Image (cartoon, grey):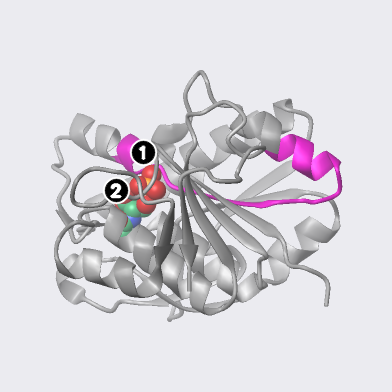
Amino acid sequence: MTPGPFVIKVGGSTLGSTDTTYADIAALARSGDVPVVVHGGGAEASRWLEAMGIPSRFERGLRVTDERVLPVVVAVFAGLVNKRIVAAVNAAGATAVGFSGADGRVLECRIADPSLGFVGEPVRVNPGPILALQQAGIVPVIGPIGAVPGEPADQLVNVNADTVAGNIAAALGARRLVFLTDVEGVRDAAGERIPRLDAARARSLIADGTISGGMIPKIEACLHALALGVEVQIVDGRRPGALQSLEGAGTLLVP
Ligand code: X2W
């Protein structure tokens, strides 16, 4: 069996002036190992919402997405942030094409908890468009909007970007899923980085509150992909060359 692709989750806040993420992604693509990129942009969405006088509210790391928030997050994730990343990967010397999980119904969702509003929980991944681009040597860049199939149009929904990455990596049979974040890795109660974290300990750290907020969907996405045989690692994406020196970096999830 051919090993699956390398899936890279880029958090909105990790892309600064010191990281080499785009150059690293372009270098992988040019070497023939075309990565699949999934991105967030939560901080950017919060800034646009604030400018519009709409406060941001999160429950267990998920943005409560009402009918005022939804059009803004669609515009920011499927538009602005997606196209900025596409433009940067293209400029770094690879070819990237961006879309969201609603395009081609790549990410079919359901609304699992109506109290969160239009927040999608993935139920099915249709990988066709991702694979077609990848086979053509083009880097797919996927934004965290999903579709709930319906009439007369699918319902657009906001999906946590880590959840998107975990589901896509699992569906593609990815050999590796790397989360580029703005922290050094998962920390224990004493604040020390945990280099290797097994699934049982991860669950207990969530249960006792050591892992909280936005780290919860990230770890849940890790566990989902891990259970399907994907190697999963959380690393500090602000570090230059983060994608080139993964050995021993951040937190490696183990079964
Ligand atoms: C996230 C999607 C973006 C995201 C949000 O609206 O913020 C939900 O919480 P980061 O940069 O990876 O945090 N969606 C439902 O996850 O961005």
**Disc 1 element:** loop
Q: Is residue 173 left or right of residue 72?
A: right
Please give the name of the residue rendered at 60% of the width and 75% of the height, measured from the top-left corner: 171
Q: Is residue 146 magenta?
A: no
Q: Answer with left or right where residue 95 lies relative to residue 237.
A: right
Q: Which of the labelled discs sits on residue 183, or is there none?
A: 1
82 vs 86, left or right, is left
Where on the picture, by quarter, is residue 219?
A: bottom left
How far across and down, in percent of the image, does residue 110 sit?
A: 36, 79
Name the residue type under label 2.
Arg
For residue 154, above or below residue 175:
below
At x 32% / y 66%, what residue is drawn? 202
Residue contact at pointers 1 and 2, CB within 8 angstroms: yes
Rendered location of residue 48, percent (x, y): 28, 34
Between tags 1 and 2, which lies in front? 2
Judging from the image, what secondary structure is the residue with disc 2 in?
A: loop
Figure quadrant of residue 63: bottom left
Given residues 252 and 234, the one toward you in this image is: 252
Residue sitting at x 66%, y 73%: 173
> Disc 1 marks which amino acid?
Val
Residue 81 percent location from the top left of the image:
48, 38
Q: As displayed, is residue 249 above or below residue 127?
A: above
Q: Is residue 187 left or right of residue 126?
A: left
- Image position, residue 207 (x, y; %): 18, 70
Specify whether residue 167 is in view.
yes
Q: Which residues are magenta?
A: 25-45
- On residue 187, which mark appears? 2
